[in-house]
Structure formats: structure tokens, C-alpha cells
Image (spheres, rainbow, N blue to C red):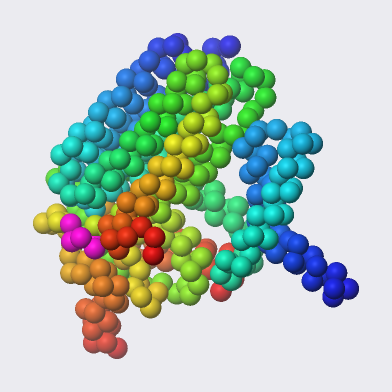
């Protein structure tokens, strides 16, 4: 049993990645013919085996269903963000009050932080600029700063960081 | 109606490309130029897709995908070069 | 091709074109680099997304089946646009690109450049405690 499971983990070190590779291969060729499924399967097995030694261990996604609702929330926010930015850009530029904010973050691992920073960059009027070396502070450039900068910090922490935390279960 | 819309959007995209080119020329700093170049990549993807609709062929998607990947990699390479003075660490 | 489908495709195309144009106008009009960074990363991505949706609908009507090929481009752009923006912001901080006069908390740029925690806030918190 242990030999079998070891052989399985040697052959498929990253099962999820293999599946994604196969799906992307089929999407790229936009077909489901047998030849492409076979070729995609071979690629999906060979590429993870070659790449496995390069992998850095990342935390697993604990709640996959939360990811779906997070993606939809993100889509909605991206659309709203675009209308807001479009109005600001076309309107008088004197009204824009930019500013920088340091947001304290509680996430520890690199992957959740990357997800959070990408989210912050895609959503209303904020661009994630840098992270302090101890990974406790996220510097954010805000396009249109409200009078009280605590509002921005609360928005990022409550709306996005808590959800990312739930997804990765940390 | 679609013919008019396609021509109209093509004009908009061309104006956008000219504005990007203007920023590429006057950009006070190198970073502005990289940003303009990156935006030009994305706008040209939109233009290629529009050309696909105009010619009624799905043939251009591969080209658009290639430009998207090359644009991302080249922007990141420029950024890395400016950060460290070297592309490969 | 029916009128409704044509209307949907045209609406998406024009919306996409408008967003791309707004992003490029922002690139020209806004004053300093950090502010300029906001316009292309957001507006252009959604604009291209709209053009791609129009293209998917159109190809579905020509070929009779939906090719998911185009969704890959959107997905790829949504994943890569924040990374590019982040790296460019980092480069701008590294090279001390000028910021607008009325930018608030300008001192944070220097600490962010050295990747240190913000000092003033710590002191403030200490005083509060």
C-alpha cells in the first residue's frame, strides 16, 4: 500500500496542477479529441515531475467553495472600480487627492499575501506598492484618499483580508 | 450596425495607441515609458481581436495570446532590470 | 445574425473601446507616476475584457460553438496585470520618482523603499498604549 502510494506521489507530485495543465491544454486547442487528450495527459504528467524539485511548499486551500464566492465578489468590485477610476480620470484632475497608507497584515505565508496584494491592486483606486521585510506591513497607494485613512485600512482588512484568511484557513 | 461599431471602436483604439505613444515619447522617467509600452501591448491585443471580428475569423486569438504573454514577460524583465541592474539573478 | 445579438456585440465593443480610451487618456492627463499607474492597470483590463466577451459572442454565432480559447486571454490578463503594476510601483520607489505635492504620507515612500515597517505609526501606537 505504501509502495503504491509512494509510486503515485512520485508519478503525480502535484495532482491539482496536472489537472489544471490538462484543462488549459484542451482550452488552448479548443477541442476534446482523443489525440489532444492523450497528448495533454502526457504533458500533464511529465511537466509536474520535472518541476516538482523547484516547488516551494505553499499552504493548501482549505475551503474551495469560498474561492468561488470570492471570485464573484472580486469581479463585481473590479467593475465598480473601473467606473470609479474612469469618472476620476475624465473629471477635473485637481480633485484627485492621492496618498500612501501602511496596512498591517496578519497573513504569514507568501501565497495568501500575493493573492491579497493582487486583489488590492485590481480593486477600487488602490495599488499595492511594497511589503516590509518582516511581511507585517503592506504599503498601498490610494488614488482618492478619504479624509480618514483608517477607512481604507478597514476596507482592505475586513472586505478582503478576512476572506483570504478564511480560504487558506489560517 | 456591427460594421459601424467595429470602425468606431477601431478609431477609439487607434487614438488610445497614439496617446500611449505620446506618453512613450515624453515620459519624464523610464518607468513612465515602460508603463506606456505595457499599455500599448494591451491595446494592440484589443485591436487584433477587433481585426478578427472584422475578418470573421478566429485565427487571430493565438496571436493575441502570444502578445499578452510576451508583453507581460518583457514588462517584468524591464522592471527587474531597473530594480537590480540585472535580469537574471 | 439577429438584431439583438448584433446590439449586444456592438454594446460590448463600444464599452470596451471606451474603457481602453479612458485608460489611455488617464495615462496622458494625470500628473505623477503613481497616479498614472491606476488608469491603465484597471481601465484597460476591463476594456479588453469587454472586447473579448464581444468576440466570444460573435464567434459563437459564426461557428455555432463557443470556443473557450478567448477566456484564457482574459484570465491571463487578470492574473498578470496586478503583478506588472506592483513591479512598476516598486521600480518607481527604488528610483525615487517624483510624487505629487499634495500626496499624503509621503514619508512612507522612504520606509517602503527600504522595506522597513513604518516608524511613526509604531511610535503613535506606543503612545496610545
The answer to whether C95 is drawn above or below residue C5 in the figure is below
Q: Residue at x 44, y 36 (%)?
A: B67
Tell me if I can see residue C118 in this picture. Answer: yes
- In this rendered view, identify the residue nearer to me: C61 or A33: A33
Q: Which residues are magenta?
A: C93-97
Q: Residue at x 37, y 37 (%)?
A: B41
Looking at the rendering, in which quadrant would you find the N terminus of chain A? bottom right
Asked if the magenta segment contains residue C96, the reply would be yes
Q: Position of residue C37 (x, y in %)?
A: 28, 48
- In this rendered view, identify the residue nearer to me: A139 or A26: A26
Question: Which residue, as the protein is rendered here, is positioned at the far left?
Answer: C101
In the displayed structure image, the side of residue B9 where residue A94 appears, left or right: left
Q: Residue at x 40, y 52 (%)?
A: C82
Q: Residue at x 65, y 42 (%)?
A: A25
Looking at the rendering, in which quadrant would you find the C terminus of chain A? bottom right
The answer to whether A162 is drawn above or below residue B42 in the figure is below
Q: Position of residue C28 (x, y in %)?
A: 20, 38
- Number of on-image labels: 0
Main SS category, magenta section: loop
Tell me if I can see residue A91 in this picture. Answer: no
Asked if the magenta segment contains residue B1, the reply would be no
- In this rendered view, identify the residue nearer to me: B40 or C10: B40
The answer to whether A43 is drawn above or below residue B9 in the figure is below
Q: Position of residue A83 (x, y in %)?
A: 35, 40
Q: Position of residue B72 (x, y in %)?
A: 41, 46
Amino acid at each position: 500500500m505504501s509502495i503504491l502510494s509512494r509510486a503515485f506521489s512520485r508519478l503525480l507530485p502535484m495532482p491539482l496542477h496536472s489537472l489544471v495543465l490538462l484543462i488549459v491544454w484542451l482550452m488552448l486547442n479548443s477541442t476534446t479529441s482523443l489525440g489532444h487528450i492523450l497528448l495533454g495527459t502526457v504533458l500533464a504528467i511529465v511537466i509536474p515531475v520535472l518541476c516538482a524539485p523547484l516547488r516551494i511548499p505553499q499552504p493548501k486551500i482549505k475551503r474551495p467553495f469560498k474561492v468561488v464566492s470570492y471570485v464573484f465578489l472580486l469581479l463585481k468590485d473590479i467593475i465598480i472600480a473601473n467606473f470609479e477610476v474612469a469618472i476620476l480620470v475624465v473629471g477635473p484632475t485637481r480633485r484627485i487627492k492621492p496618498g500612501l497608507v501602511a496596512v498591517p497584515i496578519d497573513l504569514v505565508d507568501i501565497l495568501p499575501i500575493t493573492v491579497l496584494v493582487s486583489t488590492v491592486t485590481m480593486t477600487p483606486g488602490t495599488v499595492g506598492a511594497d511589503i516590509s521585510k518582516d511581511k507585517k506591513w503592506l504599503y498601498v497607494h490610494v488614488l482618492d484618499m478619504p479624509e480618514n485613512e483608517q477607512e481604507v485600512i478597514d476596507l482592505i482588512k475586513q472586505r478582503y483580508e478576512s476572506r483570504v484568511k478564511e480560504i487558506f484557513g489560517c | 450596425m456591427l460594421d459601424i461599431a467595429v470602425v468606431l471602436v477601431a478609431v477609439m483604439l487607434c487614438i488610445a495607441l497614439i496617446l500611449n505613444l505620446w506618453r512613450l515619447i515624453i515620459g519624464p522617467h523610464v518607468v513612465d515609458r515602460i508603463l506606456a509600452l505595457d499599455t500599448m501591448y494591451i491595446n494592440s491585443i484589443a485591436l487584433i481581436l477587433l481585426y478578427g471580428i472584422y475578418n470573421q475569423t478566429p485565427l487571430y486569438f493565438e496571436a493575441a495570446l502570444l502578445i499578452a504573454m510576451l508583453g507581460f514577460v518583457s514588462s517584468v524583465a524591464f522592471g527587474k532590470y531597473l530594480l537590480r541592474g540585472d535580469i537574471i539573478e | 445574425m439577429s438584431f439583438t445579438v448584433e446590439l449586444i456585440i456592438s454594446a460590448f465593443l463600444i464599452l470596451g473601446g471606451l474603457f481602453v480610451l479612458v485608460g489611455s487618456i488617464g495615462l496622458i492627463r494625470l500628473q505623477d507616476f503613481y497616479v498614472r499607474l491606476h488608469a491603465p492597470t484597471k481601465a484597460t483590463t476591463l476594456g479588453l475584457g469587454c472586447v473579448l466577451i464581444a468576440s466570444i459572442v460573435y464567434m459563437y454565432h459564426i461557428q455555432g460553438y463557443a470556443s473557450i480559447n478567448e477566456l484564457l486571454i482574459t484570465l491571463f490578463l487578470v492574473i498578470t496585470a496586478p503583478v506588472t503594476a506592483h513591479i512598476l510601483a516598486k521600480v518607481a520607489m527604488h528610483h525615487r520618482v517624483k510624487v505629487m505635492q499634495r500626496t499624503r504620507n509621503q514619508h512612507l515612500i522612504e520606509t517602503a523603499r527600504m522595506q522597513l515597517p513604518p516608524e511613526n505609526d509604531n511610535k503613535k501606537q506606543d503612545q496610545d498604549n
